[in-house]
Image: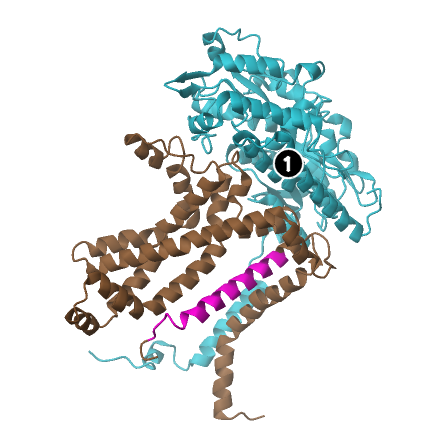
Amino acid sequence: MASASPHDGSKDRPQGWTRRTLLGAMAAGAAGFAAFGPRGARTRAEGRIVLDYWEKWTGHEGAAMQAVVDEFNESQSRILVRYLVTAGIDQKSMIAIAGGDPPDVLGLYNYNIPLFAETGALLPLDEGDGSAAIPPLEAYAEAIRPLLTHPDRTGRSRRWACPNTGGALALYYNKAMFAQAGLDPTRPPATLEQLADMSARLDASRDGLYTRLGFTPTEPGWWPWAWGAYFGATLTDPSARRARVDSPEHAAAFGWIRQTAARLGPERINAFGSGWGNSYDSINNAFLAGQVAMVLQGPWLASVINAHNPDLDYGVVPFPVPASIAQGPPVGLVESDMLCIPRGVRHPEASMEFIAFTQQPRIVERLSTAHFKNSVLAGVSPEFVAKHPNRGVAVFNAVANSTRGFHAARTRQFPQIRSKMGSLFPKVWNTDTPVEELLKGANAEVQSLLVLEHEQKARRGWGSGA
Amino acid sequence: MKFSARARTDLAGYLWISPWILGFLLFMLLPVGLSAYYSLTDYPVLEAPIYVGFDNYARMWREPDFRDAALRTLLYAAAVVPLCTILALVLAALLCAGRRLTGFLRAAIFLPTLVPMVAAGMVWMWLLNGGYGLINQSLALFGIQGPNWLGDGPMVLCSLIIIAVWGVGHSVVIYEAAMREVPVSLYEAAALDGMGPVARFWHVTLPMISPAILFNVVTLMIGSLQLFGMPAVLSKSNEGADPKAFTFYTNEMFNQAFLNGQMGYASAMAWVQLLFVLALTGFTFAISGRLVHYRGG
């Protein structure tokens, strides 16, 4: 077999072509492609302004939002919105805004607003062209309104966002299990004391192992920072300068959690619930599988119920609070997904126009229905309640409209505070360390975060009133 | 201007490697330099950095989250490095000694290292599910009630160590290759001296493959101290669990930078990590002088 010389390849080339001319041609081609090659849709779309809309939703939630975007694109011929699914949206948008290439419309979580607003990463929606089309605060549910505003560095409260969907938390209960346990399914618990009594009657075990629990704060355990609020506590004072984790209300809340753990036995309950961690969207979901009779959840649980156990006979009531504070509007956590306009966008008025379009009641109700969520608006149509796939949607709407609806602490430190409360909960649940001692330690840690925040603000010239 | 033939050759060489040099300068050296600067600033990403001297470094020692994450990472590395090293050596020795099915076994041991990390994380998430996972279901067949692997701090650490050991195949392949390079004459001489298999492994094999052991230990150590992906994946599937249980040093650094907007502080953490890894690697190389034998060296 003849061995090929390195130069033999020249026979395959067109006559007169050398390695140098080949490389030159390739380089020229690459430069030409870079200079005159295809561009993104921003410069095409038949003369329309193209907006990039970053949102977190995929699956049926993403499809519902895409339908809203499509309807907007068809409703006019000036603007074209592109829906771009973005995982880790708060992290990626932070980099994009800092890098000067932000999306035109951004879908954040409500707890992102303090950091983004305080650092000037968002454009206020209460000034500029198109702001007149943005609905006023009064259009939104009572507990949603505080989520849409935040003080800027001058201390002035500004409007930074519009909600597109929102979720409130309430108590789901299994009516069939209530009947089996001799409880009246039409009279679910209205106070925390009743919840404890009913829960004890619903607990069932065999050979020392649980087969069913009435209620446990560990399922799903997604909001360990929120328990205090059901007892009237807040994580910080209104100015977010002082931590309030060791308040008497928090002591009562975590004392109740410690009592619940003592009654149920943390080891037994941890063994019983060891499969719940990643089983939310499955038939093994503890509530769907009949392992717990009552669960604190949002309206979105209906999508899991409808998908995996549509025959489940459930009811929804506001989550009970201690009898001493039970009189009054319902208490519950309220969260919302936010539409914002980052600083540095090229067409803020076009972004504003799109956001205003999404705030029409029929759009909000359609999107909320498709997402299995309650409405973020102050009022809802009768059809919304009648046709909603969650039979308890009226309860979730009531919580969102309640003056006692509560939300994430309005400080940029909230993600860290949430993490610290998340670590506090298992210590209360699993150990014998006095609750007051644990709360004191957690309070000191949260306080140090708040001090750090104010040091950083002072460094940037924030006034004492900021 | 005329260049000598040597200069032209050099210039051509530099031109050929210029894309890499440019990439290195832009995407490695510049970010490293910037992170050194940011570590001395208060930099929330969305606003300009402000110089604060060594405040971020001082803050680190006051932060309980930093201490927790650093300690958890050290414990992980302290368990993973010896466990993986010993297991890999044993498996490599067995593969070298084996006559049947060695190809299949080698592939079976190496295969896990080819599985993408996120895919592996999803599989382990279900394997380790306390109620429905294959591991606890298998233990139940023997009357053993398995733990809630991903439910609390110590068990999360154990789970991650198990997952690391599962991915030992890469080291096994390197050790096996090194063992096959050991001259047979040394084993024959050792056998003539009356050494048994264990003594031959200890006195012949280990010294002869010690450069490979050093390489593996150093890379394993660095990889363990930079653990990030697997706990990040597993924590996403266990929202109700203690978040700190899944927070290792690099996860804490990431959270500070991109979740809490503390890029200056995160940059300082990165530099502490780099200096610690450099010091540990340097120390390992320093003590390796007496333990590692280079053929012909």
Left or right of residue A67: residue A361: right
Residue A147 vertical placement versus A403 (above, below): below
SS type, badge 1:
helix
Tag 1: amino acid: Phe
Q: Would you say residue A101 is visible in this rendering?
A: no
Colour displayed for chain A in the image of the structure: cyan
- Quarter of the picture holding the N terminus of chain A: bottom left
Q: Position of residue A185 (x, y in %)?
A: 53, 8
Residue at x 43%, y 62% (from the top left corner) = B219
Quadrant, the C terminus of chain A: top right
Q: Around disc 1, counting alpha carbons within 10 Å, would you say few (fewer than 14), some (14 to 19), or many (20 or more)?
A: some
Task: Find out whether residue A15 is within the magenta segment.
Answer: no
Q: Is residue A315 left or right of residue B114?
A: right
Image coords of residue A455 (percent x, y): 76, 49
Q: On the image, numbered disc 1 is attached to which residue?
A: A72
Query: Which colour represents chain B?
Result: brown
